[in-house]
Amino acid sequence: MYSRAYKAGVTIPPLLWVSVFLLVPYAILFCYSFWSVSPAQVIVHNWNLQNYLQLARNPIYLQVLFRSMRIAASVTVFALLLGYPLAYYLSFHAAKRKDLLYQLVIIPLWASYLVRGYAWKTILGSDGVLNGFLQYLHITHKPVEFFLYSPFAVIITLTHIYTPFTLLPIYASLEHIPRNLVEASHDLGSSPWSTFRRVILPLSLPGALAGATFAFVLTLGDFLAPLLVGGPSGVMISNVVVSLFGAAYNWPLGAAISFCMMLLVVTLLFVTERLEKRLAVS
Amino acid sequence: MKGGFQSRRAPLLGAYAFLVYAFLYFPIIVLVVYSFNGFGVGGFPPANWTLDWYRQLFTDGALWDAVLNSVIVAAVAVAIALGLGLPAALALDRTDFPGKALFRRLVLLPLILPGIITGLSLLMLFVAVGMKLSLVTITLGHGTALISVATTEIFAGLQKLERAQEEASLDLGANHWKTFWRVTLPNLRVSLIAAGLLIFTLSLDEIAVSFFLIGRDNTLPLEIWSRLRRGITPEINAISTLILFFSIGMILLWYRLRTRLQGAKESAAPLVPASIEGETA
């Protein structure tokens, strides 16, 4: 139906741009991961697997990776625990206030990451709001140090930031559940709990899975929250990459880690997408 | 049985929902309250209420330079993202070509891929071609990453479009280009404005990609970031408060436009940002 010129006109410019600014850069990243840095701090273009071998051999990288995955898993669980019930409430119980309450979720979704991260820094700090409050109530007498600069601080900050991301696909899947299914279950004598367990929960699983994937993947790659509130014990895998691209000056090794992360993320997306489809069919 | 399940009251669930909202808004409220606190960013209770931090803010030249930089970057990023997102959305909606599925994935990848990977890959590209890091590289980075948002938002708009008008235009003898300019584009106006608002807001706040592409001139988030390392004063609360209210205004405007777009046809439709839903679509 559309002319060849029209098709070319809408296809070629974005294709070209995306190739130059996404595909080529990813390819360069991949190339870098096989190179190395000479003692004179020059990047040497001899191809080998040295960087990948180093990642496999040196336990420190795996340790940080596992810590990052633990933190990402915690954030995912908390985001689901907070996001799912709220999505359920919005979809089934909010009634007339639905629109307003939905907007109240959208606002923190798109509002500045940095502003919200900074807010947690002022709350959790040793002279922060929380410590001030505890001392004001005479619950503690000197500042509690472990609030800030700990994995705990990273988890609470990122849970705050990614809960709205997790909620949205859950809410979408709940909204897509035909209401007559729910009413049929109810009319046939199911209790609200068993209606939830037998009808609503299974139908919302693809959304929950999509939400969980968002939380996990976005947390796994985060490097700003650890820098802002994490401290040495909250260092995550992306922070290692940042330092390799900065002071530690080893771009090839940093590129190898980045490529592994990318592979991990893309595999995860692929698997969860398959799972979502399967859940949606059955 | 009217309403049935839905009208059932659930006080416990309601209380839990309230607590989740409290968690989501607590840091934001603290931030705003302490921007008026004469004693600094922490402590309790806040006291010695003052507008000094805002006064300091308005005479802070470096900060306003950064604001100006950010606005320029965001404006150009909107142009890039819309300029490429519109054809990309049309291509996904209306054409078939080999590698279309791959193309869709590639365009949407920056949406879900951690910013660090997009930022670093672009950094390596710019180094490889010998381009100096500056606001230009940041703008290219934002534009590229946000094509994903533009594409999904405009794609959602295209799906709501009445094809009949375009077909009428073609039947009456207009060619595809004329139909595009006279019928498709005007009908997509609201979608484009909404997408532009969202992209502008996201670019203003963007930090993960910019972090790697920064030259000598700071954008606003990077200026704030560098100040955080030097020690914090409520002046940062004050600028954060302003950023927050600006973002909220833009987001609500975007939301209203989207509601208007979808509302007429299916008022109960879930207004999930297409950018997010598109990932699973």
Image: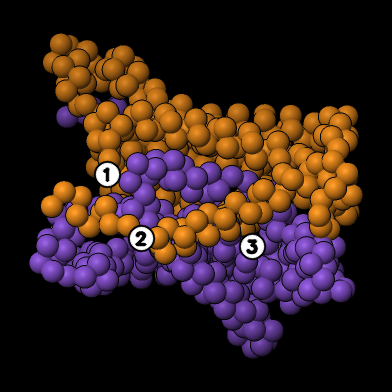
Give the residue displayed 42% in from the left and 70% down from the top.
Answer: A267
Characterize the local packing of mark 2: few (<14), some (14-19) or many (20 or more) Cα atoms within 10 angstroms.
Answer: few
Give the residue displayed 60% in from the left and 51% down from the top.
Answer: B25
Q: How many marks?
A: 3
Chain B colour is orange
Instruction: Label 1, secondary structure: give it.
Output: loop
| Image x and y of residue A171, in percent | 36, 54
Chain A colour is purple
Q: Is residue A11 left or right of residue A101?
A: left
Q: Amino acid at mark 2?
A: Ala
Q: Amino acid at mark 1?
A: Phe
Say if mark 3 contacts mark 1, CB within 8 Å: no
* Real-space Cα separation, disc 2 to disc 1, in angstroms: 51 Å
Instruction: Label 2, secondary structure: give it.
Output: loop
| Image x and y of residue A90, in percent | 38, 52
Residue located beneath label 2 in the image:
B10
Residue located beneath label 3 in the image:
A157
Residue located beneath label 1 in the image:
B97
Q: Amino acid at mark 3?
A: Thr
Marks 2 and 1, the one that precedes in the sequence: 2
Residue A197's image quarter? bottom left
* Real-space Cα separation, disc 3 to disc 1, in angstroms: 43 Å
Instruction: Tell me if I can see residue B62 in this picture.
Output: no
Q: Please identify, in this view, whether the residue under mark 3 or under mark 2 is nearer the observer.
A: 2
Give the residue displayed 21% in from the left and 26% down from the top.
Answer: B162
| Image x and y of residue B257, in percent | 42, 29
Task: Kindly identify which chain the residue marked by label 3 belongs to.
Answer: A
Q: Is residue B131 left or right of residue B45?
A: left
| Image x and y of residue A115, in percent | 68, 48
Q: Please state which of residues A210 and A74 is positioned toward the viewer in this rendering.
A: A74
Characterize the local packing of mark 3: few (<14), some (14-19) or many (20 or more) Cα atoms within 10 angstroms.
Answer: many
Q: Is residue B72 left or right of residue B150?
A: right
